[in-house]
Image: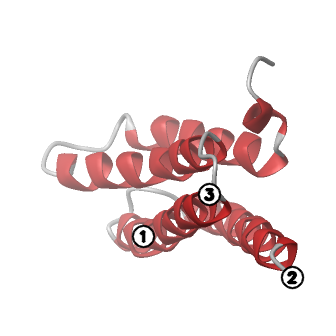
Amino acid sequence: MAFAFEKLLVYQKSVDFADAICSKTENFPRGYGFLSDQVNRASLSIAANIAEGNGRFTKPDRRNFFIIARGSVQECVPLLELASRRNLITPPDHDSLKSNLEEIARMLSGLIKGLDNADN
């Protein structure tokens, strides 16, 4: 792996999550392109902001991008809920994807706390 952030488990899990979302949304029926686009963009934003944050030189900059990534995690929750309510994803898929988001959110919080504690 060429970049340091690629070694981060939270980054790897975020890419896996975005890939899973791509797979689940590729066959959404006509009329749900808005939902497919939004959840794909939000899921990719998680990994992209982790990568971009790791490329920053200052702790406040890195922290800001990790917070944005965590916000993208939160954004995925109602999108998955709507997909589930519209029967676009199965209840087990919804539960599994949401569980992945919860884990990613905890890991991002840990990254943020680690940066905060490094200031002390």
Task: Please tell me which residue lies in front, 87 or 81.
Answer: 81
Q: CA distance from mark 3 to mark 2?
A: 16 Å
Q: Is residue 17 above or below residue 7?
A: below
Residue at 50 percent across and 74 percent down: it is: 74
Mark 1 closeness class: few <14, some 14–19, many ≥20 residues within 10 Å: some
Q: Earlier in the sequence, mark 1 or mark 2?
A: 1
Q: Position of residue 50 (x, y in %)?
A: 61, 49
Give the residue pinned by disc 2: 120
Quadrant of the rendering where the N terminus is positioned: top right
For residue 58, side relative to residue 79 (left or right): right
Residue at 62 percent across and 57 percent down: it is: 62
Q: Is residue 86 above or below residue 89?
A: below
Q: CA distance from mark 1 to mark 2?
A: 31 Å
For residue 1, side relative to residue 91 (left or right): right
Q: Secondary structure at mark 3?
A: helix
Give the label on residue 62, or none. 3
Q: Secondary structure at mark 1?
A: helix
Give the residue pinned by disc 1: 75
Q: Position of residue 43 (x, y in %)?
A: 48, 51
